[in-house]
């Protein structure tokens, strides 16, 4: 008997919180139903004129970035003012960062190494792109919503997911894809603004693209695969769906992720899952009965392989040798592999 591992799973009732603040004017009340397109709230939001990644500019760790700031959070700076500086150990050289635009200094992301220069504030109207019910509404605790969701498992999450959880800050926002989500992308493929977005960066993400996405305002980046050393060293909220290195990106998973584009999503590092909120009348991707969580009969079941010869590929079991506990898995028509039962996970797609 083997537990079925679901890459996508449906939840009829899931509670999540949208953070608010004192400057928000909320239009929904406790107990109200929310429909697609309903006005939720209006909030004041500053444009971002410039984002600076201090570890790259002056050569320091993200955690130490705050120690080299020359300007205070909320301070107005002029073009050419010194934002940060770092003196070398021998005291002979000094690295300085000058601001390229006049604006207000924001250190909200300083623990991740970023400093933003903000422009004028304007009112932004936030509308629902999902259906649900208001559980509670409070400027301090946020807007608490109950809704149907589809969850996607993450194989690994960075430590910054857990830092957000400990600070009672949910990582949430609109889920968008780079391109169609199927390729390996470069910095030239990026748009100008990802503020507040959770971005799927494709089948494999490189360091320059990862850091540029956060520089452009992304709150979280998800990729199917990435380099393990980069993942271990990153101090940003990053999630990995498939694994590490150059691995296969199965069509079923790729289509499932593409179906979630433009959904509101909550990234939960503790559960290692992404919760995609039901969008309007859009049916959740997997509506079939999922009560049986155990696989007693293997024939015909879908598996994802972790065998070195077929790592990351999804196929169908066509034969099972109970004595040796080896499966014969068909990955493409006529192309079969014999794999140990311990080297696969059974998946629902």
Image (cartoon, grey):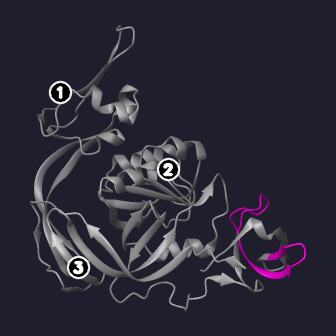
- Circles 3 and 2: CB atoms closer than 8 Å: no
Looking at the image, which residue is at 50% across and 44% down? Answer: 207
- Circles 2 and 1: CB atoms closer than 8 Å: no
* Whole-percent x, y for residue 20 in the image: 18, 63
- Circles 1 and 3: CB atoms closer than 8 Å: no
Compared to residue 203, the image places residue 76 above or below, namely: above
Q: Mark 1 or mark 3: name the one nearer the start of the chain.
A: 1
State whether residue 12 appears in this view.
yes
Q: Could you say which is closer to the camera, residue 325 or residue 189? A: 325
Q: Could you say which is closer to the camera, residue 171 or residue 189? A: 171
Q: Nearer the viewer, mark 1 or mark 3?
A: 3
Quadrant for residue 329, please give it: bottom right
* Whole-percent x, y for residue 185 in the image: 51, 54
Q: Which residue is mark 3?
A: 135
* Whole-percent x, y for residue 222 in the image: 47, 59
Q: Mark 3 or mark 2: name the one nearer the start of the chain.
A: 3
Image quarter hosting the N terminus: bottom right
Q: Which residue is mark 2?
A: 186
Tag 1, which secondary structure?
loop
Q: Nearer the viewer, mark 3 or mark 2?
A: 3
Compared to residue 1, the image places residue 221 above or below, namely: above
Write the start and end of the magenta stretch as one range: 305-329
Q: CA distance from mark 2 to mark 1?
A: 31 Å
Q: Which residue is mark 1?
A: 81
Looking at the image, which residue is at 33% across and 81% down? Answer: 147
Q: CA distance from mark 3 to mark 2?
A: 41 Å
Image quarter hosting the C terminus: bottom right
Left-right relation of 112 to 288: left
Left-right relation of 161 to 300: left
Q: Mark 2 or mark 1: name the one nearer the start of the chain.
A: 1
State whether residue 191 appears in this view.
no
């Amino acid at each position: 008997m083997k537990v079925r591992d679901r890459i996508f799973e449906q939840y009829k009732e899931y509670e999540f919180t949208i953070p608010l603040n004192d400057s928000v004017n909320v239009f929904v009340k406790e107990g109200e139903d929310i429909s697609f397109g309903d006005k939720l709230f209006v909030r004041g939001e500053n444009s971002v004129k410039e984002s600076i990644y201090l570890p790259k500019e002056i050569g320091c760790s993200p955690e130490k970035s705050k120690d080299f700031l020359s300007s205070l959070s909320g301070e107005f700076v002029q073009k050419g003012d010194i934002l940060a500086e770092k003196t070398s150990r021998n005291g002979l050289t000094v690295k300085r960062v000058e601001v390229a635009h006049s604006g207000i200094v924001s250190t909200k992301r300083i623990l991740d190494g970023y400093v933003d220069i903000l422009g004028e504030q304007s009112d932004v109207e936030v509308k629902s792109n999902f259906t649900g019910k208001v559980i509670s509404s409070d400027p301090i605790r946020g807007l608490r919503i109950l809704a149907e969701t589809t969850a996607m498992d993450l194989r690994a999450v960075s430590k910054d997911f857990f830092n957000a959880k400990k600070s009672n800050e949910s990582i949430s926002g609109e889920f968008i894809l780079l391109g169609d989500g199927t390729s390996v992308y470069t910095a030239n493929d990026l748009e100008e603004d990802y503020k507040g977005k959770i971005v799927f960066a494709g089948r494999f993400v490189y360091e320059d693209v990862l850091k540029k996405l956060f520089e452009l305002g992304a709150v979280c980046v998800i990729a199917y695969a990435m380099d393990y050393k980069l993942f271990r060293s990153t101090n940003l909220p990053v999630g990995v769906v498939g694994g590490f290195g150059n691995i296969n990106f199965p069509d079923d998973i790729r289509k499932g992720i593409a179906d979630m584009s433009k959904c509101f999503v909550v990234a939960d590092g503790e559960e290692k899952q992404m919760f995609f909120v039901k969008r309007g009348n859009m049916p959740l991707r997997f509506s079939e009965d999922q009560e049986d969580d155990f696989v007693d009969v293997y024939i015909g079941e879908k598996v994802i392989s972790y065998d070195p010869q077929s790592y990351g590929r999804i196929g169908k079991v066509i034969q099972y040798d109970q004595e040796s506990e080896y499966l014969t898995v068909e990955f493409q028509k006529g192309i079969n592999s014999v794999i140990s039962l311990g080297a696969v996970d059974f998946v629902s797609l």
